[in-house]
């Protein structure tokens, strides 16, 4: 998927020899060695603009004699370095053998102090009311590289403070340092070349093309990459100080792409979702629609209690009823591609004890070719990996309909799927015993004999297998509603009940011990081994299946097919 | 013997009866050079230009032959030639004489150059304000096409080239070659970052491109006419040919003169050609080559090395008119647009004026120039308005130091050089002016008994 790592070359930074990949951008290369080159406009996933001038360093190369082309040596035998007459921006410097860099000389320090001072002369310094405060590169670099005092006594530029660039992005023009990251993002990544600058010099202003607005589904990435508080999320603006928020790694459930995210919360309330860098999946980006998903956590129709026959009851009573119903036989299961791999695996074990047909529901729609795929579920492939599904979704739902009518099936265990919406009539559902495990109330939960509350991805821990067959972990961000337990525990208790054992594994870690033992593709894997960026598994066993996805940022089914046939 | 002009480029400029049409140009031997060279090998012609030692006339003085040699021939991409006719440097008015008064000379030079570098297409990017000039050029190009000097299979050869006139929209920075290229591509005129965008490799539409000044291209015609080695005999060593000096400001007679490089001094130019300072005045300062070059203060002495290697000393008026001599004195001859100031001039106001211009024309792309230029403008404006502080003197110099050499394009130097030269050279004037202001303010405070700040609101 990623290009082979280039051969390492040796460069010299502040007198120390470092091994870096050949041709790598100097800022990135030094970051790997823990050396920070301050920068604003440079972003590793965008083209180089070189306009902020914060990354100025001194560069030089070993000198060669013009006539003989032999290296020129100093008196001590070391190669003589020809230092450039002017400082150079690190962001346009690529690592070549013998490159010499100075990052701490008085000249470099003077450059950094100068640029810092320039960036601040017309900056409003309204940190006390700025959303970016606490995660602002101006604050950070002013502290680390600035002079600490200002020599500016003139009047500052006055610019608009709240310009609506689009439905989700608000611009504070005075704070903008004109780094053009947002302009480049829209043109290069979102392919929606809508932003640009008007006016000249220090009066330059970010704006949209006349008659257009910034309303593509990736517009909020401009807020993420804005190094200052100029672009703010209209939704998050003024809601919470970022230093009060804690972030937890998660996976976006919007589609099978499996965008890596960070979910930011305080005291059990989620405030925002931002992308988490994963160069093999979503780079540094995520969709705007994916950032809205957390709002389902506080939806008014959340199921937050166990119920039997539409009456609230203790968990044990509900689980006892479920066990009785399952033991009665004639059971059909409707599994969910929204469930985690661990939940799917536990459900499979339940199916093994109380067998019945298992169906999946298709959630196909049109993707955008970038980070939203045609499959609107995060974990369809997990169902195959867990051994729960053998066929693609939708194929045996019709059959189930007939089986219900003839009475061949008497009990339906549905996970998160609204059967009414799938064409099952109320009468038909009333005739059967419906067990519903889900997060939000719907027609099916209304008609169900037993309702088990489920938790959203933000309230539990687990893993999803994305379209690349990459198993990725998500973690609990906020607690579920009072009185609920994670789905994995509901299923584990149920499994214990029907299997007659004392307890079943009820944590991801424990489930993974079983998974690695029973799923050949995961042999030797542990929960911990998935790491922060996930792990791709061998999917050749499912090569015959044709999933609905088209191309996305780091996934090309055509390329996979080519590998398969070739 | 009094110094004489040597008119090569301006030979027919202002000549009585000389018109801008093709017939007149051809009566004066026009397009003979193109006829002569179209059968020669392009590489030979490039070598002639290199042999001539011709330096670019746009301000930076880069050797033209070397620039052409940098062209990326391996990529297989088409090569473009752009004539930079965006003449906007304050104090400069040499290119427009060629455009308005002898356009065919430029077209012929352009076509010869295009053939020499085998350009696929040639552009003339002309400053937006010169709308009449654009019309003149377009008419000249039409005439040249009609006579088969341009267009398909020029003069029966296998070489074809079209020339397109493109008008700028009124922006100084679009005279910077990469800003010009961006503008020509239809984008905002932001200069490109070098590396990697060296025009000779990644120029117009990311193809190898040569950008030459109007006068440079006109000079090429004469280089190819005389032959490179012959041309190199004109002028000074390392700076061949003639320079056009456009003198403005406090002299009796302003105007333009074409003088062989190194054959006259600033004194010759200002006294013999311009008639010296206005009656009753004395010279005080000179901005030698367009407003961004470093100012010279009359009375300064420069320790220099004479051509034979021996040390010497020049006053400002002793400086010979060639680029190496100017460089030895810490300035440059730039575009040859000389701005002369006499003893009635307030040097602080001079700088305030220049700072206002460069702040207005900063494109705003990179931080030091964008913020530095406006800050400098605000300080110098404040000092001129009576609000000077003694610390402003060092501040101006220091801000300029923080800009020069740290920007994407040379506009950073254009912002910084006037400040870096004006402030140290006229420090006494700055301090005297500010001290007077401070006294006035103090007196003001006393006379209002300090009540000035206590206005009822």
Image: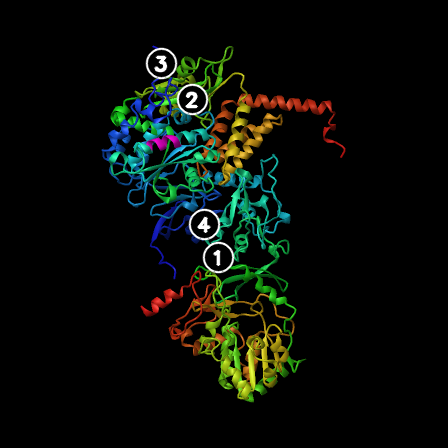
Q: Which label lies toward us, 4 or 1?
A: 1
Marks 1/3 in contact by CB < 8 Å: the verdict is: no
Counting from the top left corner in percent of width and height, residue A159 is at 60, 42
Is A366 rendered above or below residue A106?
A: below
Furthest-right residue in this view: B456
Q: Which residue is mark 2?
A: B246
Marks 2 and 4, how far apart at CA: 52 Å
Secondary structure at badge 1 equals loop
Marks 4 and 1, how far apart at CA: 21 Å
Q: Which residue is mark 1?
A: A284
Residue span colored magenta: B138-144
Q: Main secondary structure of the magenta part?
A: helix
Asked if the stretch drawn in magenta spans residue B141, the answer is yes
Q: Quadrant of the N terminus of chain A?
A: bottom left
Marks 2/4 in contact by CB < 8 Å: the verdict is: no
Secondary structure at badge 3 equals loop
- Left or right position of B242 against A211: left
Query: Visible in this render: residue B196?
Result: no
Q: Nearer the viewer, residue B451 or B196?
A: B196
Marks 4 and 3, how far apart at CA: 62 Å
Q: Which residue is mark 3?
A: B3
Is A144 rendered above or below residue A353?
A: above
Please tell me which of labels 4 and 1 falls first in the chain: 4
Secondary structure at badge 2 equals strand
Which subunit holds the residue at mark 4? A
Query: Dividing the picture into quarters, in which one does residue B238 lie?
Result: top left
Marks 1 and 3, how far apart at CA: 69 Å
Counting from the top left corner in percent of width and height, residue A427 is at 61, 83
Q: Residues within 10 Å of mark 4 (few under 14, many from 20)?
A: few
Which subunit holds the residue at mark 3? B
Counting from the top left corner in percent of width and height, residue A286 is at 51, 59
């Amino acid at each position: 998927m990623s290009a082979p790592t280039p051969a390492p070359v040796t460069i010299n930074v502040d007198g120390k020899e470092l091994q870096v990949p050949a041709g790598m951008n100097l800022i990135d290369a030094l970051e790997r060695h823990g050396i920070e080159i301050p920068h604003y406009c440079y972003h590793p996933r965008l083209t180089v603009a070189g306009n902020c001038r914060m990354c100025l360093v001194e560069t030089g190369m070993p000198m060669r004699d013009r006539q003989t082309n032999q290296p020129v040596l100093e008196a001590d035998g070391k190669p003589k370095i020809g230092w450039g007459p002017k400082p150079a921006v690190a962001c346009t410097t690529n690592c070549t053998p013998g490159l010499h860099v100075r990052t701490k000389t008085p000249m470099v320090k003077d450059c950094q102090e100068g640029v810092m001072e320039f960036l601040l002369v017309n900056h409003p310094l309204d940190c006390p009311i700025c959303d970016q405060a606490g995660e602002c590169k101006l604050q950070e670099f002013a502290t680390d590289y600035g002079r600490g005092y200002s020599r500016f006594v003139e009047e500052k530029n006055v610019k608009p403070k709240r310009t609506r660039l689009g439905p989700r992005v608000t611009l504070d023009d005075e704070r903008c340092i004109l780094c053009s990251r947002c302009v480049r993002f829209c043109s290069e990544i979102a392919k929606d070349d809508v932003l640009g600058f008007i006016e000249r010099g220090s009066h330059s202003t970010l704006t949209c093309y006349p008659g257009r607005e910034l309303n593509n589904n990736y517009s909020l990435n401009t807020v993420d990459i804005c190094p200052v508080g100029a672009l703010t999320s209209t939704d998050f603006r003024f809601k919470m100080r970022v230093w009060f928020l804690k972030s937890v790694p998660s996976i976006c459930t919007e589609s099978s792409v499996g965008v890596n995210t960070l979910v930011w919360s305080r005291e059990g309330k989620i405030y925002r979702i931002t992308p988490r860098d994963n160069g093999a999946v979503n780079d540094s980006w995520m969709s705007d629609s994916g950032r809205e998903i957390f709002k389902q956590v506080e939806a008014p129709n959340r199921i937050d209690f166990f119920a039997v026959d539409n009456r609230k009851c203790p968990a044990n009573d509900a689980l006892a009823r479920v066990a009785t119903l399952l033991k009665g036989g004639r059971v059909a299961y409707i599994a969910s591609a929204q469930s985690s791999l661990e939940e799917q695996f536990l459900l499979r074990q339940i199916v093994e004890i109380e067998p019945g047909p298992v169906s999946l529901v298709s959630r196909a729609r049109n993707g955008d070719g970038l980070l939203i795929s045609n499959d609107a579920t995060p974990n369809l492939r997990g169902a195959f990996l867990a051994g729960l599904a053998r066929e693609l979704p939708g194929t045996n739902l019709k059959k189930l309909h007939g089986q219900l009518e003839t009475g061949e099936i008497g009990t339906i265990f549905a996970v998160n799927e609204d059967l009414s919406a799938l064409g099952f009539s109320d009468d038909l559902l009333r005739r059967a015993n419906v067990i519903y495990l889900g997060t939000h109330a719907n027609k099916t939960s209304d008609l169900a004999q037993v309702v088990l509350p489920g938790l959203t991805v933000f309230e539990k821990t687990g893993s999803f297998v994305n379209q690349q067959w990459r198993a990725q972990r998500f973690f609990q961000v906020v607690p579920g509603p009072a009185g609920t337990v994670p789905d994995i525990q509901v299923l584990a208790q149920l499994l214990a009940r029907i299997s007659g054992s004392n307890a079943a594994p009820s944590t991801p870690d424990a489930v993974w011990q079983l998974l690695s033992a029973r799923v050949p593709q995961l042999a030797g894997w542990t929960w911990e081994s998935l790491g922060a960026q996930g792990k791709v598994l061998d999917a050749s066993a499912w090569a015959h299946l044709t999933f609905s996805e088209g191309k996305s940022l780091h996934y090309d089914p055509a390329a996979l097919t080519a590998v398969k046939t070739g | 013997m009094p110094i004489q002009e040597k008119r090569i480029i301006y030979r027919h400029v202002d000549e009585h009866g000389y018109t801008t049409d093709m017939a007149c140009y051809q009566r004066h031997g026009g397009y003979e050079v193109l006829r002569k060279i179209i059968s020669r090998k392009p590489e030979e012609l490039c070598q002639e230009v290199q042999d001539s030692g011709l330096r670019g006339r746009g301000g930076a003085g880069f050797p033209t032959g070397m620039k052409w040699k940098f062209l990326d021939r391996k990529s297989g991409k088409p090569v473009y030639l752009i004539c930079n006719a965006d003449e906007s440097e304050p104090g400069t008015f040499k290119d427009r004489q060629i455009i308005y008064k002898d356009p065919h000379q430029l077209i012929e030079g352009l076509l010869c150059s295009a053939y020499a570098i085998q350009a696929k297409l040639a552009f003339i990017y002309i400053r937006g304000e010169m709308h009449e000039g654009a019309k003149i050029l377009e008419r000249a190009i039409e005439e040249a096409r009609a006579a088969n000097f341009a267009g398909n299979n020029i003069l029966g050869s296998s070489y074809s080239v079209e020339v397109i006139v493109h008008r700028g929209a009124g922006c100084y920075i679009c005279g910077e070659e990469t800003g010009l290229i961006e503008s020509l591509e239809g984008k905002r005129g932001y200069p490109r970052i070098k590396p990697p965008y060296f025009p000779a490799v990644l120029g117009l539409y990311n193809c190898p491109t040569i950008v030459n000044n109007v006068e440079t291209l006109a000079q090429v015609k004469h280089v190819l006419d005389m032959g490179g080695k012959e041309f190199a005999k004109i002028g000074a060593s390392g700076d061949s040919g003639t320079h056009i000096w456009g003198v403005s400001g406090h002299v009796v007679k302003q105007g333009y003169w074409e003088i062989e490089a190194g054959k006259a001094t600033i004194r010759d130019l200002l006294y013999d050609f311009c008639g010296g300072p206005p009656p009753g005045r004395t010279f005080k300062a000179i901005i030698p080559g367009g407003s961004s070059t470093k100012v010279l203060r009359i009375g300064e002495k420069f320790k220099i090395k004479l051509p034979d290697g021996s040390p010497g000393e020049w006053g400002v008026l002793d400086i010979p008119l060639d680029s190496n001599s100017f460089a030895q004195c810490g300035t440059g001859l730039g575009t040859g647009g000389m701005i002369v100031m006499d003893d009635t001039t307030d040097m602080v106001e001079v700088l305030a004026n220049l700072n206002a211009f460069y702040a207005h024309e900063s494109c705003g792309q990179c931080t030091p120039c964008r913020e530095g230029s406006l800050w400098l403008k605000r300080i110098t404006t404040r000092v001129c308005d009576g609000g000077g502080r003694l610390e402003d003197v060092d501040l101006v110099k220091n801000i300029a130091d923080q800009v020069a050499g740290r920007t994407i394009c040379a506009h950073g130097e254009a912002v910084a050089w006037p400040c870096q030269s004006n402030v140290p050279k006229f420090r006494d004037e700055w301090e005297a002016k500010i001290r007077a202001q401070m006294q006035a303010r103090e007196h003001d405070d006393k006379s209002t008994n300090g009540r000035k700040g206590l206005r009822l609101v």
